[in-house]
Amino acid sequence: MKIATIIVRVLIGLLLLFASISFFFKLAPEPEATGNFKAFNMGLVASTYLLPLAKTIELLCGIAFVTGRYVTLANILILPITINILFINYFLAPEGLPIAGLLFLANIFLIYRYWDNYRSVFKAQ
């Protein structure tokens, strides 16, 4: 199980690193958005801070996952972003749902594997 944890951690880290680095350096063209997803995407871009903030968190969490340091913190930081990625793909762009689902499941798997680190948060004082 330890090897599976390392593999999932590194794969999710590489995916997050690729997504954030390609956003900041414009390495890949943005896919053409249509319909409601286009309106949603225009709102994200118009906010001017939300997309760069999310991509910065993705970058930091990707580095944490690949290096294996601060993974417990990275799991919690990236969870709301993976939930939003999952919902955006479910409701607005279903063609990306398989990757979004795998990203969410990998995040849940890593939280499960590092659960002992979170146990004290849920203890009654």
Image (cartoon, rainbow, N blue to C red):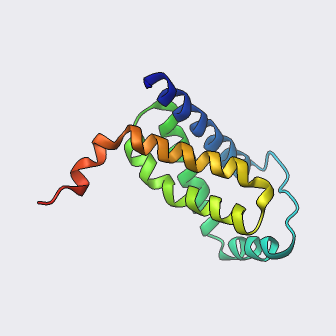
Residue 70: in sight, yes or no? no
Vertical placement of residue 77 versus 91, above or below: above
Q: Residue at x 39, y 48 (%)?
A: 73
> Furthest-top residue in view?
3
> Furthest-left residue in view?
125
Res 43 → quadrant: bottom right
Where residue 106 appears, as percent x and y from the top left, is 55, 42
Where residue 19 appears, as percent x and y from the top left, is 68, 47
Where residue 23 appears, as percent x and y from the top left, is 72, 52
Q: Which of 28 and 82 is in front in this view?
A: 82
Left or right, residue 63 beside residue 101? left
Q: How many marks?
A: 0
Q: Residue at x 48, y 42 (%)?
A: 109
Q: Nearer the viewer, residue 88 or 10?
A: 88
Residue 31: in sight, yes or no? yes
State the quadrant of the C terminus: bottom left
Res 116 → quadrant: top left
State the quadrant of the N terminus: top left
Q: Which of 25 and 7 is in front in this view?
A: 7
Vertical placement of residue 9 versus 22, above or below: above
Where residue 20 appears, as percent x and y from the top left, is 65, 48
Q: Which residue is drawn at 40% across and 37% down?
A: 113
Left or right, residue 14 beside residue 118? right
